[in-house]
Image (spheres, rainbow, N blue to C red):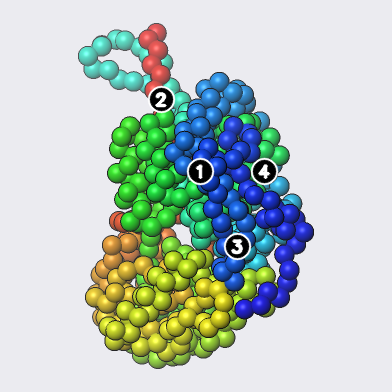
């Protein structure tokens, strides 16, 4: 598919030079001298060359982060000073919004209009929100009652201190935003970081590294080591001088991260996969529910961990909803993300393209019928048609497993008493949607659904104030909101005898 709009001059300059690792405030070649290519998924052509970090580079980065934590100026900054730096990062993101959105489009495939409207401002807002928390990480005072020391008096209090050096591994579906989700709370709490971006999409994280230095983040506080999961990622997760690892990605890799982290019992937070139910009742605003179901699965090419990929519709409205959703899918303009007319871009990589088309083949073999889509798009790049599948059963592969593409399985329901069980019939528990005009029904069902986020008459609502994470095999801990701060803080009790 042809590119309708050429890349901007800033993007051209950034991609034309080989990109390096950020370690201890300096841009460096990898220790091995190796590089890897990152691709434009809309054309399959090489976009840029990037230094390939491995275990030796991770070790250097962890050493730099440790020195910055223990001996550098970072720990001596006041919370207010630290907060101002974090806030400045958000400002710089918005000052370079067009360039960052374009990098995201070229590296990931998503439409530039989407990156400009969602990814970039959400990333900036996350830094702004976390900047405010830097001055509010307070402990408390306690009056201990010690039965075995009658008459003794104490003054006791708690301190909240940074957990230390943090390894952060981010995915390819929202590269800039996921970097913000990880870096914002880590910096607000005073931690230091080694960040490994996904090998498919390293560019926006590397550009963000330049902005972090411009904002005044001291050398070694944030180190960025692009590379592959089997080498750089594994080395970071298992490093003995890393105090915590935060990972966003697949459940399968999350389990590997958790096992690797046991060496020094580092703390682990995981934001993993999902197979989220989206439920439409007969009393819903059906047109709004159709639009919400389409947004829930086709946004970002369906490459969203919380995508509403299981659609349950009360049977008397099933045909209407499926028809409306199919019409919505047919109307989506698929193309290169730099084309301003594009509404859906390509999948991120050949590997992901193969994964999604394999699931489409499995669905056909199991008797699922595509009312729209169901195949790849002819031509260059890794494009897949927006797809609506019906005739699915609860034990079918497309209902059980995360596809991570623009593919939804629609199923009718009639038994209201069994609905919560159907919604919860999954290894995952990341998100859900409920569409009804009966607010009492919505609240009752929201309590029964085992998921970290339940949308009512909406879908894909993200905000820096809202905690995000999952139940069951969708992960440990939460991103965003006040809740995420506990991932990056230790609590210390201090007791003084009087």
Classify mark 2: helix, strand or loop.
strand
| Cα–Cα gap, marks 3 and 1 | 19 Å
Task: First in sequence, mark 4 or 3: give its number.
Answer: 3
Mark 3 vs 1, N-terminal side: 3
Residue at numbered disc 3: 46
Residue under numbered circle 2:
492
Element under label 3? Answer: strand
Single out the mark in the foreground, 1 or 4.
Answer: 1
Looking at the rendered image, the disc whose residue lies closer to the viewer, 2 or 3, is: 3
Q: Which quadrant of the rendered structure holds the C terminus? A: top left
Q: Residue at x 47, y 68 (%)?
A: 350
Q: Would residue 370 be visible to someone looking at this image?
A: yes
Q: On residue 210, which mark appears?
A: 4
Q: Which secondary structure lies at badge 1?
A: loop
Question: Dots 4 and 3: beta carbons under 8 Å?
Answer: no
Q: CA–CA distance between discs 2 and 3?
A: 50 Å
Residue 285 drawn at (x, y percent): 49, 81
Rate crowding at label 2 as few (under 14), some (14 to 19) or many (20 or more) other CA atoms within 10 Å: few
Corner quadrant of residue 334:
bottom right
Asked whether the beta carbons under mark 2 and mark 4 sit within 8 Å of each other, the answer is no
Q: Is residue 196 left or right of residue 204?
A: left
Placement of 232 over or under 43, stated as above or below: above
Dot 3: within a 10 Å radius of its alpha carbon, few (fewer than 14), some, or many (20 or more) residues? some
Q: Is residue 247 above or below residue 189?
A: below
Image coordinates of residue 338 in percent, x first then y, are 67, 70
Q: Which residue is mark 1?
A: 53
Location of residue 279 (image quadrant):
bottom left
């Amino acid at each position: 598919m042809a590119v309708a709009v050429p890349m901007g001059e800033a993007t051209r300059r950034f991609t034309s030079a080989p990109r390096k690792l950020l370690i201890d405030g300096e841009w460096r070649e990898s220790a091995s001298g190796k590089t890897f290519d990152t691709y434009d998924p809309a054309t399959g052509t090489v976009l840029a060359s990037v230094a390939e970090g491995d275990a030796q580079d991770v070790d250097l980065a962890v050493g730099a982060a440790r020195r910055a934590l223990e001996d550098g100026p970072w720990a001596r900054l006041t919370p207010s000073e630290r907060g101002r730096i974090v806030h400045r990062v958000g400002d710089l993101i918005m000052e370079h919004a067009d360039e960052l959105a374009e990098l995201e489009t070229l590296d990931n495939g998503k439409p530039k209009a989407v990156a400009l409207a969602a990814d970039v401002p959400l990333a900036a807002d996350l830094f702004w929100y976390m900047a405010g928390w830097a001055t509010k990480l307070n402990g408390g005072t306690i009056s201990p009652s010690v039965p075995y020391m009658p008459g003794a008096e104490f003054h006791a209090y708690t301190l909240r201190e940074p957990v230390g050096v943090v390894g952060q591994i981010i995915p390819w579906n929202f590269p800039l935003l996921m970097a913000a989700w990880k870096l914002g709370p880590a910096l607000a709490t005073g931690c230091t970081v080694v960040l490994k971006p996904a090998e498919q999409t390293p560019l926006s994280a590397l550009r963000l590294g330049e902005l972090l230095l411009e904002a005044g983040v001291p050398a070694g506080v944030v180190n960025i080591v692009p590379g592959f999961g089997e080498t750089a990622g594994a080395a970071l997760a298992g490093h003995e001088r890393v105090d915590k690892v935060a990972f966003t990605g697949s459940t399968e890799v999350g389990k590997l991260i958790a096992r690797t982290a046991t060496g020094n019992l580092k703390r682990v937070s995981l934001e993993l996969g999902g197979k989220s139910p989206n439920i439409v009742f007969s009393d819903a605003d059906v047109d709004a529910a159709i639009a919400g179901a389409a947004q829930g699965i086709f946004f970002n090419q369906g490459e969203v961990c919380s995508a509403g990929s299981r659609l349950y519709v009360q049977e008397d409205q099933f045909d209407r909803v499926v028809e409306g959703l199919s019409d919505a899918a047919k109307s989506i303009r698929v193309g290169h993300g730099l084309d301003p007319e594009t509404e859906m871009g390509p999948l991120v990589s050949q590997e992901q393209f193969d994964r999604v088309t394999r699931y489409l083949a499995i669905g056909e073999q199991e008797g699922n019928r595509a009312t729209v889509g169901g195949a790849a798009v002819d031509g260059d790049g890794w494009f897949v048609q927006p797809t609506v599948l019906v005739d699915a059963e609860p034990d079918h592969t497309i209902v059980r497993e995360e596809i991570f593409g623009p593919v939804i399985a629609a199923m009718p329901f009639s038994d209201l008493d069994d609905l919560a069980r159907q919604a919860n019939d999954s290894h995952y528990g990341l998100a859900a949607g409920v569409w009804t005009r009966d607010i009492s029904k919505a609240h009752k069902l929201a309590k029964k659904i085992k998921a970290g986020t339940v949308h009512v008459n909406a879908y894909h609502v993200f905000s820096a104030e809202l905690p995000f994470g999952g139940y069951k095999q969708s992960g440990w801990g939460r991103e965003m909101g006040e809740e995420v701060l506990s991932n990056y803080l230790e609590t210390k009790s201090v007791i003084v005898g009087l």
